[in-house]
Every structure is written in C-alpha cells, then in structure tokens.
Image (spheres, coloured by chain):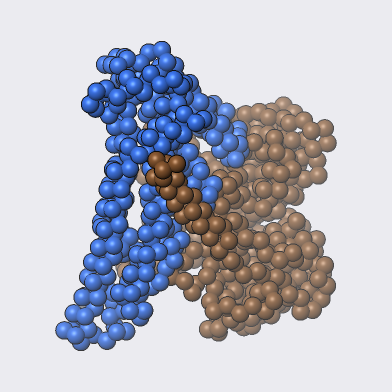
Amino acid sequence: MKNYIKLANFEINRVSKLFTVLLGITLIVQIVGVIVEARKYLNMANEKMYEEMMSIAEFLEMFNQMSFIQVVRSVWFLGPIALCIAGVAFYIFLIWYRDWFGRNTFVYRLLMLPTSRLTIFFAKITTIMVMTLGFVAFQLILLPIELLIFKGMVPSDFRNDMGVREVVSSMPEISIIIPGSLLELILYYGAGLLAVSILFTGILFERSFKWKGIFAAVLYGAVAVVLFISPLLLQEFVVDHFFYPLELFLLEIVMGLIIFAGSIWTSGFLLKKKITV
Amino acid sequence: MKKYWKSTAIIAVIVLSLGTFFVNAATSAEQYPEFVIQKQSGDASEIKPLVLDGSYADTSSASYVSTNLKISTNGSKYNSRSLIDQIIGQPPTLIKDLQEQYRSFMRGKNAWADVFFEDESFLAYADVDYKRGSLKASDFTFSISVLNKKDGNTNTFTVEVPDSGVLSHIFVEDVQVVGDELHLITQNMMPNYEEYHDEKHVYTIDLADQHITHHESIIQFPKEEGEKDLYINAELIETDPTKANERLVFLTTKEIESDHPESSDFEVMNKEIITYNLATKESEVIDVPDLDLMENQLSFYDGSNIYFTRAEGQEFIVTPFDLENEKNGQLLRIPMSNDENGNVLTPMITVNDDKLYAVDSYMNASTNAAITVSDLKSGDPLFEGEIVLKDSLELDSFDLYVHEIFLR
C-alpha cells in the first residue's frame, strides 16, 4: 500500500506539468470565450438598436435573450474540453512508453523495485483517473466563475440566467462528462476505467511481444468488447428478452467487473513473466 | 510530506468540487407540485379504485419538459427520471401490476396491454413472432402463453399463422379467453399492388390441442377501385383486458379526401358499427336508433353496452346502447366546465360496475379538471370533484394532461 501511494504520487508529479498546462489553456480560452461571445451579442444588439432603430422589445423578439448556452456551444468552450480529452487519451499511451523511450530506460528501475509489479499498473491507472477527474472538477469550479463574468457583461434584460446544473444538463455531450447524479458518474467513469484497463493490457502485450503483441492486443480488445456486450447479444438473439431491463443492467455491471479483473490479472501476468526491456 | 502536496491538492480539489456539485444536485432536485382529488359532493369512496395516468409540464420555463405522473386518492406520484427508473422503464399501470404479481410469467413479453388477457383463472398472452428479412417480414407465428392461476402451470406454444405468405404484416389487437378457447383478433396487412389492403381477422385456438380451430376475416377494407380518394378504416373498440367479452365491436369510418387542392383534409362520409360474436361466429351491422353517428362519438365499450358521447352546450351527454336488446339506455348528462378561453373541456370516460367515470383530460393554472362518477341505472351523480393543487398552492402556468383512466 505504501509503495502504491509512493508510486502513484510519483506518477502524478510526472504528469503535473502537462496537467497544469491543459488547465491553464482551459482557463484562459474559456474565459476569453465568454467575453468574446458576450461582446459579439452586445455589439449586434447595439448595431440593431442604434443603426436600425429597433426597440429593445423588437430586438429581443427577433434575436431572443442571450443565454450561457451560446457560450457553451462555441468552440471557445468545447475546444479546451476536447483538448483535455485528447490529452488524456494521448497520455494513456505515453504513461507507459515514456518509461521505455525516455532517457536511460527508466522502466528498468521501475521493474527492479522491491514491490509487486502490478503496483506499477495500479499507480498508472490511478494517475489517468486522477487526471481525468481533475479536469472535471476544474470545469465545475470554472463554470460558476464564467457565469459570473457573463452576468457582469450582459445586462439582465438581455440575458436568460442559468445555474451550473442547467448549463451542464443542456447539452448531452457535456452531461456525459458531468452527469447529473453520483450513480451516473460512477457508471460512466467506471466504464472509462474499464476501457483504460483494456488499453493498458494491450500496451503491455505490445511491450511483451513487440509486433506480434500488437496482434494479441487487438485480439484481446476485441474479445473484451464481445464479452462486455455478450449479455446484450444473449438477450437479443438467444433468450428472447428473457431478462428484465434491471437484471440486464446488473449483468452488464458484473460483466464489466469480470473483464476489469481479467485485465488486471493479464497485465500482472505480462508484467511478471513476459515483459521485455 | 512535502513531496505529496501536488497529489493531495488535486485529490482534495476533486473531492470538494464533485462533492459540492452532487450534494447540491441531490438536495435541489426539481420539485413538482402535488395534485389531489378534492371532493365537492357525493361519496369519496367511489373514487378509491381510480388511477389517472397523466403528464405534467411547467410552462413558465423556456424548456418544455413533461414528466409522467399518476394521480389517485392518495395524491400524485411522479415518475422519477433517475437512471435506474429510466432503465426499468415506465410500462402502463396494468403491465406494471402484472410484472410485480407474475414476475416469471411476464418475462420476455411485450409491455402493451392489448396482447394480454386476465380473468380470475387465467392470464393469457399472445403475440406474433416473425423473421425480419431485408425486404419484408416473413414466417409469422403466434406465440401463446397461458398461465393457469389456480395450479400455477403455464401452457406455452406456438402456432403458425395460416396463409402467412400473403401477409406483409400482422398485429395482435386483442386477446380473449372464453372457456377452453383463446380468440385472437388481429389486423392483417396484405400488399395489394401498390396499395395496402387491410383486414380484421379472428383466430380461434383450442388451448388443449394447441391448434387453430377457426379462422375468419371479419372486415376487409381495401381502397375501392375507381374511387381513388376514398379511405376506409376499421378500428376495434378496446375493452378492459381483465374481462372476457363474447362480442367484439368494430367501428368503420369512410373518409373522402376533400377537393381543395391546398388542403389535405379528410371528410368523414359514413360511420358504421359492426359487431362480431365469438360464440356464434356471426357478424352484424348495428343500427342505433335515434342517434347520429357523425355527431356522437363511440367512447367506450364494456362488453354489453356501447357508450356514445357528445357535447351539447355546457353538457356532456352519454348515451348507453344495450347490444343484447338493441335499445338505448338511460341518458346521462354531465355538466362541463370552461377553460379560460371559454372552450368547453370534454371529459374522457370509462365504465365499471354500472358506474361511469368521467375525467377532464386537461387542466392548467386557471381551470381544474373535473371528475364525476355517476350511477348508470339512475343517472344520479355519486361523486363530484376535481383535481386541484395540494394546499391550494398557486402556480403561474402549467399543463396537466390526463392520458388514461385506470381502475384498480
């Protein structure tokens, strides 16, 4: 346990630079986005009202009030989120390969540590999780600040006020990243954790058997996916909707846990017996 | 400890930020107003079995989201939109009750009430299975399950649909069990050149032999040659799935497409009521004396009487028609309320045990939905009341629709 904490802390420190840079980009771009989008709307309002002599009522009837949704739908808001997602996706691979391809093959020292080699796996998957949830937490802190700036810029007659929860639930894409209930959060990120564990196992296959390993990794991924959806296939094609929806849902969770355990076991085996430096 | 500060800080921020958000989300969950049925006169015990399925929407906010609810004498109960409830789904009240009571029998069965039949001794299910082809469905078979409630045995079997080859599709519209026979009433769609041509069929299946003993086409409604704009439609009048009926009632409607080139309205030409007796296998066109079918709506059929309704001024008039003796019953007059624009609200009706339940299908902030229960024999009101907001709460604007009256 102590080794795991040490190693996880070490991995988190290693990613902190990338993490901070991405947070910084998100902070700056999103806040600039709020300002730009609000000004765009206000400039248009000014133009319509002073140059085309529209009254406020006429203007609002034609163009509606501005809501924060317009900011959320802009590339200013979604761009940094996409960048952070890409960053995590990229780092899932980098977290392993940097140990092999960095200066003085660091993995050599990692594997020589007087601890179970599976600890390395756990430390790395924890880092990915912490990084991901860190972005989500940061977005949740940033949103009220952005809403405050938005309120400060757009006069109350011209804006449609929304709370953080309304903003989050207004777009399906955002409500996957920030779901409305704790259960959904656990399910969505649990599924994410499962996917990362499968990817890690695939990476370890490649590190163990090189080119042949890529083939094994793809095969492993395919088997995992088929196993995961097997209750659904069974329900649809074999037992003719025998299960009630809730039972099917629980079966899926059990299947996910089995595959997660399988990935951990396979990774442990590869790390102990097959890995090459 | 110093070298752990980054990890500690990140984890602390995650826990605090997500924690605050989800605690907030849980405590500030959307609050819906509660509705109750308020008695104005009569006996409140008359509405004990009543369950109203409806939907509520707050129209003051920009996003129009409606939420399903059930209103009964116990007040209102909203369907929660939590993930677990979304997974379970929201089957109709009848199906939900059956799933709770007969959990293993209800496995793998479609969740609509039409394909079920229930009485004291049987719970029956019949539906159509078929192969989905790339162009059309084929190999239609009836899959039938009958649960004997007394000994708990289930009789499950499949029967091929006769003449399955000519069908493009077939739907089960009603299931009736009379004695040892199961009657299936279906709508059969057959391709006829480019147009579809529909027929109502009845299949009688002997439950002991598991064979079709009788098959008949009751009503055919093709588009007639030469009269291109004429449309004929036939509908089976649904009955309570918890009662066996020997007589089926169909309403056929002939409509003609209006001449105006810009409008695509249909003009009703003619309506006809046809009954079919499952025991004698005879069908008959019913002539209702002194009743204009164009003005009167066929609103309900309870197995022995058909109930016609029409609005007349401020009154809602219900005319029962006895099929056995072919004569009109006691007329029932129910006063109707107006909404804020002066439009009268016509209620929905259902009949059980010689009592007629009428419920307005809509209410909003300024108009309440009225509920009346009347004795069909004497025509006297047994209960009069309305749906109101609990504790005389005042709301700016909302819509409440009642979709279905269900009697427990």
Quadrant for the C terminus of chain B, please. Answer: bottom right
Q: Is residue B195 above or below residue B71?
A: above
From the rendered image, report the letter of the chain displayed in blue.
A
Identified at 41% across, 37% down, the residue is A9
Position of residue B51 measured from the top left corner of the image (x, y, whole percent):
70, 61
Task: Work out whether residue B387 can be spotted.
Answer: no
Task: Work out whether residue A49 can be spotted.
Answer: yes
From the rendered image, report the letter of the chain displayed in brown.
B
Residue A264 is left or right of residue B248, and the answer is: left
Q: Toward the viewer: A169 or B162?
A: A169
Residue B91 is left or right of residue B146, and the answer is: left
Q: Residue furthest front?
A: B2
Identified at 67% across, 64% down, the residue is B76
Q: Toward the viewer: A230 or B319?
A: A230
Identified at 26% across, 62% down, the residue is A33
Position of residue B181 measured from the top left corner of the image (x, y, whole percent):
73, 37
Q: Toward the viewer: B197 or A237?
A: A237
Q: Toward the viewer: A165 or B277?
A: A165
Residue A117 is left or right of residue B320, and the answer is: left
Q: Residue furthest left?
A: A51
Identified at 57% across, 28% down, the residue is A239
Q: Is residue B67 above or below residue B144?
A: below
Position of residue B91 measured from the top left corner of the image (x, y, whole percent):
61, 49
Quadrant for the N terminus of chain B, please. Answer: top left
Q: Quadrant of residue B135?
A: top left
Q: Is residue B196 above or below residue B404?
A: above
Position of residue A4 measured from the top left corner of the image (x, y, whole percent):
46, 30
Q: Quadrant of residue A195?
A: top left
